[in-house]
Image (tube, rainbow, N blue to C red):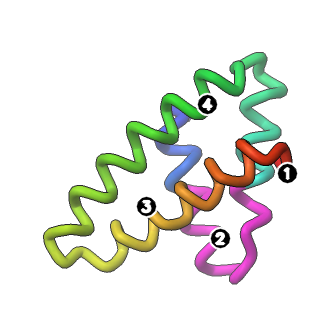
Amino acid sequence: MSFEEEVVKSLDSTKELNSFQPMRDMVALARGKNISDKEIKSKLLSLFIKYYEEGENNNEESRDRADKIADLLDEMDYNRV
């Protein structure tokens, strides 16, 4: 499964469980696969841009995904993940 697919799966789980934990777990799993934080942040940032742009076209689901990715990037910056 590609990193983008993992992110989407985690985002969907986050919505279903009403918890942010699946996103944190996805980051931990990526780190376990020796993906650096820099690479994770880069991929998350490109996904954020994609979903943000889709959200500007009144796509509520994409807007929610962009918000969650932004929250995760903030957590990573403050070393909470």
Spatial CA distance of label 1 from label 3 is 19 Å
Residue 64 is drawn in which quadrant?
Answer: bottom left
Residue 56 location (% of width, % of height)? 20, 68
* Residue topped by disc 4: 40
Q: Nearer the viewer, mark 1 or mark 4?
A: 1
Residue 43 location (% of width, % of height)? 49, 32
In percent of the image, x 50 and y 54: which residue is there?
Answer: 8
In percent of the image, x 24 and y 74: which residue is there?
Answer: 59
Which numbered disc covers residue 80?
Answer: 1
- The N terminus - image quarter: top right
Extreme front residue here?
Answer: 78
Is tag 2's residue or tag 1's residue first in the polypeptide sequence?
Answer: 2
Note whether 36 is above or below 72 in the view shown. Answer: above
Q: Amino acid at mark 4?
A: Ile
* Residue topped by disc 2: 14
Secondary structure, mark 2, is helix
